[in-house]
Amino acid sequence: MFQSLIDGLKEFGEWGLFIHSFIDAIIFPVPAFFTQVSLSMLNPSAALWLATVGFVACLLGTPFGYWIGKALGHSLLYKFLKKEWVDSAEKMFQKNGETAILIGSFTPIPFKVFTIMAGCLNFSLWRLIAYAAIGRAVKFYVIGILFYLYGRAAENMVKDVSLYIFAAAIPLVLIFLWVRKKQRAKRKAVSVIEDPVQDVKENM
C-alpha cells in the first residue's frame, strides 16, 4: 500500500517530494529519503533543488507533528505506561532532547517519531525546529550533493548514507553538546558571582 502511495507521489515530481517530506514529519511511516533518491536519479541536475524542497517541507511539517504529540501524546502514553515512567521520560527528554533530535535526524527512523515525542514531552518547539533544521539539512543536502556531483552513479553511494552520516555526526554532536555544557556552566558561575555583588551594591 505504501509503495503505491510513494509511486503516486513521484508522479508529481518536486511537489510529490514536498508532500512526502511534509507528512514524513507528521504521520507517514515511510521516510521521504526514498522519494528524494528516486527523483534525484531521474534528474541529477535538479538534486540540490530537490534537497531544498524536501528540507523546507520537513521543517514546515515539524510543528504539526509536535502539536499532535502535545494534544494527544500524554493521554496515549499514560494509557500504555505508568505515569511515573512518562514523567521521568519527560524530564530526560527535556535534559537530553537535543541529542535525541540531532541523532534522530540522521537515522532511518521516521522523523515523526521525534516530532511527536517532543510534543508529548513538552520539549521546546523552537528548539525542536532549530535542531531539526541542523540534522535534516545535513541528510537532505548530502544526498542532493552526491547526485548533483556524480549523477545516477550516486545511487549506490546513498544506500548506506544514513549510516555514514550517523557515524560521522555522533562525534560532532557530542563535541557540540560538551561545548554547550561548558558555556552554560560558565554563565552559571558568572551569575553566582554577580548576584552577591549586586546585593552588596543595593545595600550600600
Image (cartoon, rainbow, N blue to C red):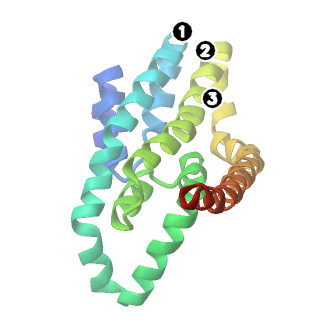
Q: Are marks 1 and 2 in contact (CB under 8 Å)?
A: yes
Camera-near label (3 vs 1) is: 3
Q: Amino acid at mark 3?
A: Val
Residue bearing mark 3: 142
Q: Is residue 1 left or right of residue 47?
A: left
Task: For marks 1 and 2, give the CA distance.
Answer: 5 Å
Image quarter in which the C terminus is found = bottom right
Could you say whether the residue bearing mark 3 is in a helix, strand or loop? helix
Could you say whether the residue bearing mark 1 is in a helix, strand or loop? helix
Could you say which is closer to the camera, residue 15 or residue 190? 190
Residue located 32% across and 50% down the image? 28
Q: Position of residue 128 (x, y in %)?
A: 45, 49
Residue bearing mark 1: 45
Res 27 visible: no
Residue bearing mark 2: 148
Q: Are marks 3 and 1 in contact (CB under 8 Å)?
A: no
Q: Position of residue 88 (x, y in %)?
A: 47, 81
Could you say which is closer to the camera, residue 47 or residue 125? 125
Q: Is residue 81 left or right of residue 127?
A: left
Q: On screen, 24 above or below 40?
A: below
Q: Amino acid at mark 2?
A: Tyr
Q: How many neighbours does mark 3 have within 10 angstroms: few (below 14), some (14-19), or many (20 or more)?
A: some
Residue located 50% across and 21% down the image? 40
Task: For marks 2 and 3, give the CA distance.
Answer: 10 Å
Residue located 50% across and 67% down the image? 93
Q: Amino acid at mark 1?
A: Ser
Q: Position of residue 127 (x, y in %)?
A: 46, 48
Q: Earlier in the sequence, mark 2 or mark 3?
A: 3
